[in-house]
Image (spheres, rainbow, N blue to C red):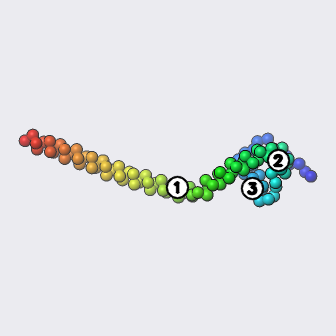
């Protein structure tokens, strides 16, 4: 059996590839632990992180979220603009009423 070259640094990409192999049934956790000189707990921890990430990735399309925020921002800007116009109008009305009371 050929030994894989030792990987000193486990990047997110390498972890993901190993976890995919485990999910596909190409390797078991104990096999991967022996092959890469890792503990089973380390691999299980990575798998837990990956599962949490999968849930977030499947919740919504990031593009949909961006569009939703853009729409909310547009609506807020419109509401803000209307409030500013209303505020200006009320100040003018208040000044007008004050000037008519003086005469």
For the point 58% across and 57% down, which residue is it?
59
Please identify, in this view, whether the residue under mark 2 or under mark 3 is nearer the observer: 2
Along the horizontal axis of the image, is 38 left or right of 60?
right
Where residue 75 appears, as percent x and y from the top left, is 39, 54
Along the horizontal axis of the image, is 82 left or right of 98?
right
The residue that disc 1 covers is 65
Judging depth in this view, the residue of 13 and 41 nearest the camera is 41
The residue that disc 3 covers is 20
Q: Residues within 10 Å of mark 2 (few under 14, many from 20)?
A: some
Where residue 80 appears, as percent x and y from the top left, is 35, 49
The residue that disc 2 covers is 33
Q: Residues within 10 Å of mark 3 (few under 14, many from 20)?
A: some
Q: Is residue 7 visible?
A: no
Please identify, in this view, whether the residue under mark 1 or under mark 2 is nearer the observer: 2
Secondary structure at badge 3 equals helix
Of marks 1 and 2, which one's residue comes earlier in the chain? 2
For the point 25% across and 46% down, which residue is it?
88
Where residue 58 appears, as percent x and y from the top left, is 61, 58
Which disc is residue 100 wearing? none
Of marks 1 and 3, which one's residue comes earlier in the chain? 3
Secondary structure at badge 1 equals helix
For the point 28% across and 49% down, which residue is it?
85
Secondary structure at badge 2 equals helix
Judging depth in this view, the residue of 101 and 88 nearest the camera is 101
For the point 65% across and 54% down, which residue is it?
54
Of marks 2 and 3, which one's residue comes earlier in the chain? 3
How far apart marks 2 and 3 lie (CA) works out to 15 Å
How far apart marks 1 and 2 lie (CA) works out to 38 Å
């Amino acid at each position: 059996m050929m030994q894989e070259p030792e990987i000193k640094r486990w990047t997110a990409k390498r972890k993901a590839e190993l976890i995919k192999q485990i999910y596909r049934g190409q390797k078991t956790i104990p096999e991967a632990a022996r092959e890469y000189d890792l503990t089973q707990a380390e691999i299980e921890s990575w798998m837990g992180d990956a599962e949490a990430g999968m849930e977030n990735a499947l919740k919504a399309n990031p593009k949909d979220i961006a569009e939703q925020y853009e729409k909310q921002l547009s609506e807020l800007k419109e509401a803000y603009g209307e409030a500013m116009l209303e505020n200006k109008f009320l100040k003018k009305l208040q000044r007008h009423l004050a000037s008519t009371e003086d005469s």
